[in-house]
Image: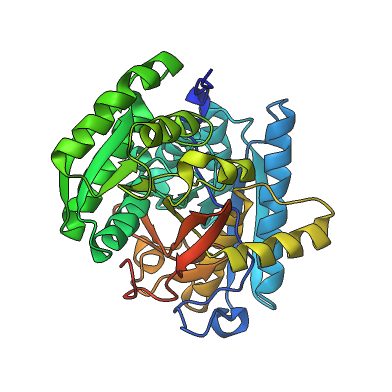
């Protein structure tokens, strides 16, 4: 049976990438980041909101990993003076709002976190009048805007990267296949926008009820529609914890294998690693942060803290990295949105990224293909904005 999504509390979650610890600078050099070059001599107080205090072991692990990653970034910034203060939200919106208000009252110039979308929205509303910005670990763009920025990789960013690559590879006629649930509908809309921006054409759309019977019933119809529409690629919203193993295999069984139609995934197809061995995903494309950077970050974190990093802990590193890069011009008050949204962006453990004025973000992603059970990078992540995919 398909697993049922049980992520309501996380409000579409924070879909994230654990990636490598590299240094950060205010501009993005092609040769790679260098912390020392970007760090200034200013002082800033950062409030880190983590889900500690919920009583859930998973939240405590996440909270510890986020704090460890943030402190690793501070250490990498060298002599930069950062006062990091950690506040537990228990994963609850009301507690997040209270802790955000307390942090601002105690002098916080910027808030890093919290994790879950509803928490981040509550925290942002609580301190909006103060002018303090919130860099949340969510990827839910519904909460982005005003003083809330989302650091997590977004559907729109991923869809745009993959759609542009597909069009460049001569596969411009794309069919969207999505789950009939909230995440699936959001993914469908993001793919539609990405294909349009890339100059491609959505030639058909297919969907299925989010159940085993729903996928089994819909697959032959989706395959037939893909053939009749002349789809050169099928862009799926399914993830590895949900419908992907079944829908990919059934589409291949119905004549839509990689030799006929290119499969593209909106989500990471390499997590968990066992997914890479599935017959239905062989030849498929998906986007991911630079895997070499991830390996470095993972190794450094493991060596420093004697445990592997949580998959989203790199976002805490990235947030501190961006803030550290701005310290040269930091004043005593809140760090302004105009500084956070500088066009050159920043470099963190997930590669290059920049924050947009609407509270969303752009991230430099690599394109990977599953070949013989392994994820192989077929187009490297860009090292500056203006390269492939931007």
Q: Which residue is drawn at 69% across and 78% down?
A: 79
Position of 351 relative to 31 (above/below): above
Query: Could you tell me which residue is drawn at 15 percent across and 36 percent down?
Result: 228
| Residue 14 visible in the picture | no
Q: Where is residue 267 drawn, in percent x and y?
A: 44, 44
Question: Is 361 on the left-hand or right-hand side of 296?
Answer: left
Q: In this view, does 55 lie above or below 29?
A: above
Which residue corresponds to the image point at 38% horizontal and 48% vertical from the top-left? Answer: 258
Relative to 36, 141 lies left or right: left
Residue 8 or residue 187, whichever sits in front: 187
Q: Nearer the viewer, residue 161 or 226?
A: 226
Q: In which quarter of the image is the C terminus?
A: bottom left
Residue located farthest toward the right when viewing the structure as drawn: 306
- The residue sitting at the top extreme is 213
Q: Where is residue 166 in the image (x, y as percent from the top left)?
A: 29, 58
Q: How many labels does the image show?
A: 0
Q: Is residue 180 left or right of residue 1?
A: left
Residue 390 seen: yes
Q: Nearer the viewer, residue 259 or 57?
A: 259
Picture coordinates of residue 381, whole percent (x, y): 45, 68
Q: Position of residue 68 (x, y in %)?
A: 72, 54
Considering depth in this image, is 183 or 369 the residue closer to the camera? Answer: 369
The colour scheme is rainbow
Q: Residue at x 39, y 37 (%)?
A: 252
User: Is 246 placed above or below 99 here?
Assistant: above
């Amino acid at each position: 049976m398909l697993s049922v999504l049980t992520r309501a509390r996380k409000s579409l979650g924070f879909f994230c990438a654990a990636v490598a610890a590299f240094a950060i600078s205010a501009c993005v050099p092609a040769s790679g980041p260098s912390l020392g070059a970007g760090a200034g001599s200013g002082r800033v107080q950062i409030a880190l909101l983590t889900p500690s205090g919920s009583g859930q072991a998973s939240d405590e692990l996440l909270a510890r990993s986020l704090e460890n990653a943030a402190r690793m970034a501070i250490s990498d910034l060298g002599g930069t003076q950062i006062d990091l203060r950690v506040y537990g939200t228990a994963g609850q919106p009301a507690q997040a709002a209270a802790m955000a208000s307390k942090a601002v009252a105690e002098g916080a110039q910027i808030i890093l976190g919290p994790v879950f979308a509803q928490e981040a929205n509550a925290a942002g509303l609580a301190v909006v009048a103060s002018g303090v910005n919130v860099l949340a670990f969510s990827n839910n763009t519904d909460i982005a805007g005003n003083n809330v920025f989302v650091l997590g990789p977004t559907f729109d960013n991923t869809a745009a990267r993959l759609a542009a690559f597909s069009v460049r590879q001569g596969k411009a006629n794309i069919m969207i296949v999505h789950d009939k649930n909230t995440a699936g509908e959001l993914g469908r809309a993001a793919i539609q926008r990405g294909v349009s921006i890339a100059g491609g054409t959505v030639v058909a759309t297919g969907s299925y009820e989010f159940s085993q019977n729903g996928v089994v019933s819909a697959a032959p119809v989706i395959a037939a529609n893909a053939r009749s529409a002349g789809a050169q690629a099928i862009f799926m919203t399914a993830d590895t914890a949900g419908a992907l193993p079944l829908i990919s295999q059934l589409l291949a069984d119905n004549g839509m294998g990689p030799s006929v139609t290119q499969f593209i995934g909106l989500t990471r197809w390499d997590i968990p690693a066992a997914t890479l061995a599935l017959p239905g995903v062989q030849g498929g494309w998906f986007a991911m942060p630079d895997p070499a950077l991830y390996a470095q970050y993972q190794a450094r974190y493991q060596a420093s803290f004697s445990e592997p990093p949580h998959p989203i802990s790199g976002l805490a590193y990235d947030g501190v990295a961006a803030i550290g890069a701005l310290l040269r011009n930091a004043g005593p008050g809140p760090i302004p949105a105009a500084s956070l949204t500088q066009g050159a962006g920043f470099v963190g453990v997930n590669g290059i990224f920049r924050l947009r004025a609407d509270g969303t973000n752009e991230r430099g992603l690599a394109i990977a293909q599953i070949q013989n059970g392994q994820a192989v990078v077929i187009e490297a992540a860009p090292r500056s904005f203006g390269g492939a995919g931007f």
